[in-house]
Image: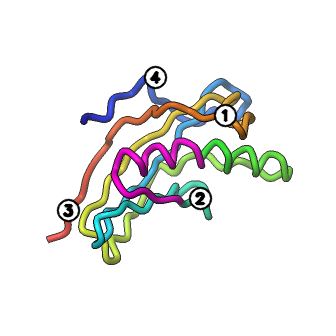
Protein backbone atom coordinates (compact mmCIF):
# COMPACT_ATOMS: atom_id res chain seq x y z
CA UNK A 1 0.00 0.00 0.00
CA UNK A 2 1.68 3.26 -1.07
CA UNK A 3 1.98 6.07 1.44
CA UNK A 4 0.35 9.06 -0.21
CA UNK A 5 0.23 12.58 1.19
CA UNK A 6 -3.13 14.09 1.98
CA UNK A 7 -1.63 17.56 2.09
CA UNK A 8 1.29 19.34 0.50
CA UNK A 9 4.48 18.96 2.54
CA UNK A 10 6.35 21.98 3.84
CA UNK A 11 8.65 23.11 6.57
CA UNK A 12 7.64 23.86 10.13
CA UNK A 13 6.39 27.33 10.32
CA UNK A 14 7.86 28.27 13.72
CA UNK A 15 5.99 31.61 13.58
CA UNK A 16 2.54 30.35 14.42
CA UNK A 17 1.65 29.31 10.86
CA UNK A 18 -0.76 26.57 10.01
CA UNK A 19 1.49 23.54 9.42
CA UNK A 20 4.34 21.59 10.97
CA UNK A 21 6.32 18.80 9.28
CA UNK A 22 8.46 16.11 10.93
CA UNK A 23 10.71 13.38 9.56
CA UNK A 24 9.76 9.97 10.96
CA UNK A 25 12.25 7.06 11.03
CA UNK A 26 10.84 3.53 11.04
CA UNK A 27 13.19 0.59 11.64
CA UNK A 28 12.13 -2.98 10.90
CA UNK A 29 13.50 -5.01 13.77
CA UNK A 30 14.67 -8.63 13.52
CA UNK A 31 11.37 -9.85 14.98
CA UNK A 32 9.46 -8.12 12.15
CA UNK A 33 8.06 -5.30 14.26
CA UNK A 34 8.73 -1.63 13.60
CA UNK A 35 10.28 0.89 15.98
CA UNK A 36 9.59 4.55 15.31
CA UNK A 37 11.51 7.70 16.23
CA UNK A 38 11.29 11.39 15.36
CA UNK A 39 14.84 12.80 15.27
CA UNK A 40 13.73 16.41 15.78
CA UNK A 41 11.67 15.47 18.87
CA UNK A 42 14.19 13.94 21.27
CA UNK A 43 12.44 11.22 23.28
CA UNK A 44 9.50 10.83 20.87
CA UNK A 45 9.31 7.08 20.15
CA UNK A 46 6.67 4.46 19.48
CA UNK A 47 6.35 1.09 17.74
CA UNK A 48 3.96 -1.18 15.86
CA UNK A 49 3.61 -4.81 14.83
CA UNK A 50 3.18 -3.79 11.16
CA UNK A 51 4.28 -0.79 9.11
CA UNK A 52 0.72 0.65 8.90
CA UNK A 53 0.28 0.21 12.66
CA UNK A 54 3.64 1.90 13.35
CA UNK A 55 2.59 4.85 11.14
CA UNK A 56 -0.75 5.11 12.96
CA UNK A 57 1.04 5.08 16.32
CA UNK A 58 3.41 7.84 15.15
CA UNK A 59 0.42 9.77 13.83
CA UNK A 60 -1.01 9.75 17.36
CA UNK A 61 2.15 10.26 19.43
CA UNK A 62 3.71 13.20 17.55
CA UNK A 63 0.83 15.67 18.15
CA UNK A 64 0.65 14.49 21.78
CA UNK A 65 4.39 14.99 22.22
CA UNK A 66 4.26 18.50 20.72
CA UNK A 67 1.22 19.40 22.86
CA UNK A 68 3.10 18.17 25.95
CA UNK A 69 6.07 20.41 25.13
CA UNK A 70 3.76 23.39 24.76
CA UNK A 71 1.89 22.66 27.99
CA UNK A 72 5.21 22.66 29.85
CA UNK A 73 6.24 25.94 28.24
CA UNK A 74 9.07 24.34 26.23
CA UNK A 75 10.08 25.27 22.71
CA UNK A 76 8.78 23.03 19.93
CA UNK A 77 11.74 22.05 17.72
CA UNK A 78 11.55 22.34 13.96
CA UNK A 79 12.26 19.35 11.74
CA UNK A 80 15.89 18.42 11.07
CA UNK A 81 17.14 18.92 7.53
CA UNK A 82 19.68 16.08 7.88
CA UNK A 83 18.79 12.76 9.48
CA UNK A 84 21.28 9.99 10.24
CA UNK A 85 19.79 6.52 10.60
CA UNK A 86 21.50 4.07 12.94
CA UNK A 87 20.44 0.64 11.69
CA UNK A 88 21.60 -1.15 14.88
CA UNK A 89 19.93 -4.59 14.60
CA UNK A 90 17.29 -3.46 12.09
CA UNK A 91 16.96 -5.11 8.69
CA UNK A 92 15.30 -2.12 6.97
CA UNK A 93 14.79 1.57 7.58
CA UNK A 94 12.06 3.81 6.18
CA UNK A 95 11.92 7.61 6.28
CA UNK A 96 8.61 9.43 6.02
CA UNK A 97 7.35 12.97 6.53
CA UNK A 98 4.34 13.75 8.71
CA UNK A 99 2.54 17.04 8.24
CA UNK A 100 0.09 18.27 10.86
CA UNK A 101 -1.62 21.55 11.52
CA UNK A 102 -0.77 23.75 14.47
CA UNK A 103 -4.30 23.13 15.75
CA UNK A 104 -3.80 19.34 15.75
CA UNK A 105 -0.69 19.79 17.87
CA UNK A 106 -2.80 21.55 20.52
CA UNK A 107 -5.56 18.95 20.73
CA UNK A 108 -3.90 16.11 22.61
CA UNK A 109 -6.93 13.84 22.81
CA UNK A 110 -7.81 13.81 19.12
CA UNK A 111 -7.02 10.88 16.84
CA UNK A 112 -5.47 11.90 13.53
CA UNK A 113 -5.55 10.23 10.13
CA UNK A 114 -2.27 9.36 8.47
CA UNK A 115 -0.63 12.18 6.51
CA UNK A 116 2.61 10.64 5.27
CA UNK A 117 4.80 10.70 2.23
CA UNK A 118 7.48 8.04 1.89
CA UNK A 119 10.84 9.69 1.23
CA UNK A 120 13.18 6.71 1.25
CA UNK A 121 14.02 3.21 2.31
CA UNK A 122 17.32 1.57 3.27
CA UNK A 123 18.05 -2.15 3.33
CA UNK A 124 21.13 -3.51 5.05
CA UNK A 125 23.35 -5.82 3.07
User: In terms of sequence position, does the residue under pointer 4 or pointer 2 come before the other?
Assistant: 4
Q: Position of residue 116 (x, y in %)?
A: 41, 36
Q: Which mark is residue 44?
A: 2
The reply to whether dot 3 and dot 4 touch (C-beta < 8 Å) is no
Residue 3 image-quadrant placement:
top left
Q: Quadrant of the C terminus?
A: bottom left
Query: Separation of disc 1 and disc 2 at Cα?
Result: 18 Å
Q: Is 75 on the left or on the right of 24, as rendered?
A: right
What residue does disc 4 label?
Answer: 7
**Residue numbers of the magenta segment:** 46-61
User: In terms of sequence position, does the residue under pointer 2 or pointer 3 come before the other?
Assistant: 2
Query: Separation of disc 3 and disc 1 at Cα?
Result: 34 Å
Q: Secondary structure at mark 1?
A: loop
Q: Is residue 7 above or below residue 112?
A: above
Would residue 47 be counted in the magenta stretch?
yes
What residue does disc 1 label?
Answer: 110
Q: Position of residue 95 (x, y in %)?
A: 36, 50
Other-residue count near label 2 (Cα within 10 Å), few / some / many at <14 / 14–19 / ≥20: some
Would residue 77 be counted in the magenta stretch?
no
Query: Separation of disc 2 and disc 3 at Cα?
Result: 23 Å
Q: Secondary structure at mark 2?
A: loop
Query: Separation of disc 1 and disc 4 at Cα?
Result: 18 Å
Amino acid sequence: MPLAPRRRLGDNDGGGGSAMTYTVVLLRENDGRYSVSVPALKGCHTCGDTLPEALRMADEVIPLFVASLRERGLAVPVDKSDVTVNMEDASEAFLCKLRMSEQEATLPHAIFRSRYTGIGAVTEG
